[in-house]
Image (cartoon, helix red, strand yellow):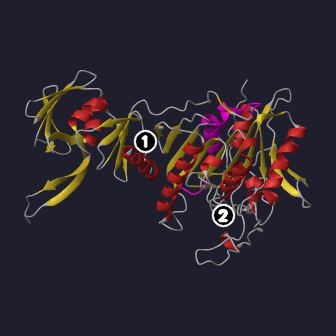
Amino acid sequence: MEGKIFLRPGTPDDANRDYLPESIFGSDIVVNENGNNSQPHPKNLVEKHEILWGDEEDTWFEYVPDTYDPAKKTPLVVSCHGGLMSGWGQCIYTSWTYVADREGFIVVFPNAHEYKFWNVWEGPRKLPDGSEMTTGPGGMPLPKAYPSFKEGPDSGQVLALIENVKARFNIDPGRIFIQGMSMGGMMTGMMIHYFGEKFAGFATAGAPGGAPRGVKNADPSEHGPVSGFISMPEFNGYDKNPDRSRDDIEGVRSAVAYWTAVNDCTDLPEIKLEGEDNYFFYTGKKANFTLRVIRNRDHGQTLDDAELVWDYCFSGIRRDENGDIVQGGTKLPRKGDSFGIALALGKQNALVNSKPIRLQIPAFLHEKLKYHGLDGGELVRGEYFYAPVSFLAQAAGAECNMSADGRTAELILPDRRTVQFAQGSIGCVIDNKIFSMDNEAVIRDGALCLPVEWFFRRLLGCFVSENRGVCYISDHYIELAAHTAALIEDILDL
């Protein structure tokens, strides 16, 4: 039986813009910043101190929900904080404790060993000019770099912490997961690279999710399968360097290439847009992989990130006694939009409900011009996304009757309305009544073409979102992110 989540009110402290102000610890103070929202300090969060590995005392924060049942095998989640953060900061900036209350699993939030930075490097840390990097964000000293990540205290601490928790609680050894934000995501990547067989799944937020950054020339063929979930904000690092947006897109492409190879995902993904959340669900023969791109969000992790990781990934996976990933049904189905259409400028392929469709000609932009006026000349009053009427009818599930010369068309929509179009006319006829479109119907390379946005918005009541020359249409509210647009372009090139 599920426990109930109780959302607790907090006291906003908008005047305090210190990075993770210490006044939050143990209080009901909350801080909000573009989707990154802290929660009041949970009552069951306990600070723990013990030597787990080596000679130094380790610190972690442990959350055991009231719904924990010691008679049942219980999942364990290890959640790694970002650079300059701490275990308690990772706790209050995520929803792991809320989800644990409902599902009954245990969560631990370890502190990095040195200077609030995880040791995710191997060997000397080199800058582009060849010099050694000695300080991190805020001028903080970086931890010692070891020849191998496996020799460092952070990996030893996390592995020992898992054994510590298993000795005290009834932990299901086949359902141990690891997740991290920013540098904690890098830490997660390194743990999965070297100790992936110990985890059924991993998740990262606002972090490189492909080959572990600290491992040179990582080869996917050398990596065992692990179910994965990567969340990438659209403006990850954009506030510091606008070029990072482009770099992040390449990082996402790298992550997709890496994990689809590791998990043997050969089919096209199912695509789902839900508001600002853009999902790619890849199904693998060995394990599944999910990418979430978050439109209009900065570096960090959204408060609901843990909920989504659990619902789409961790809730349905385990490792069996042979060490193989067993993929069951997740709490939310990993399904694409039942009505989702994607087109890209210059591409002759399109996607309809995550399946490729060939267009008569590639999608293109067509200007809306004003030629006459007191000052003469012409003015551009807008650019519109165009596609062949034959494709629009197919995507809408409409019957299309073209004239012999291809200059006019009549469509019978699924609700039995009839719509007429004609070359050169901004008018259309809907059930024998004349209406104006946003721009005129045109012939391009022998194909009668219409403005895409008008067609779906006006005739079908759909939502349309554009980014980077890609247009996505669905029957519910959507916001297309730049990373999503880039990946759709890649798919349409196949």
Q: Residue 478 carries which label?
A: 1
What's under tag 1, amino acid-wise?
Answer: Ile
Q: Quadrant of residue 206?
A: bottom right
Q: Do the residues labelled 2 and 1 touch (CB within 8 Å)?
A: no
Q: Residue at x 59, y 78 (%)?
A: 129
Query: Residue 340: within the magenta?
Result: no
Residue 376 position in % (x across, y down): 7, 64
Is residue 189 shown left or right of residue 353? Answer: right
Q: Observer-nearest residue: 421 or 243?
A: 243
Residue 335 position in % (x across, y down): 50, 31
Q: Quadrant of the C terminus?
A: top left
Query: Residue reaching furthest front?
Result: 221
Q: Residue at x 67, y 47 (%)?
A: 94
Is residue 61 shown left or right of residue 368? Answer: right
Q: How crowded is mark 2: few (under 14 residues within 10 Å), some or many (20 or more)?
A: few
Of circles 2 and 1, which is in front?
Answer: 1
Secondary element under disc 2, as helix, strand or loop, is: loop
Residue 63 position in % (x across, y down): 80, 43
- Compared to residue 345, the image places residue 122 above or below, namely below
Residue annotated with mark 2:
16
Q: What stretch is highlighted in magenta?
A: 298-322
Secondary element under disc 1, as helix, strand or loop, is: loop
Q: Which residue is drawn at 53% across and 47% down?
A: 256
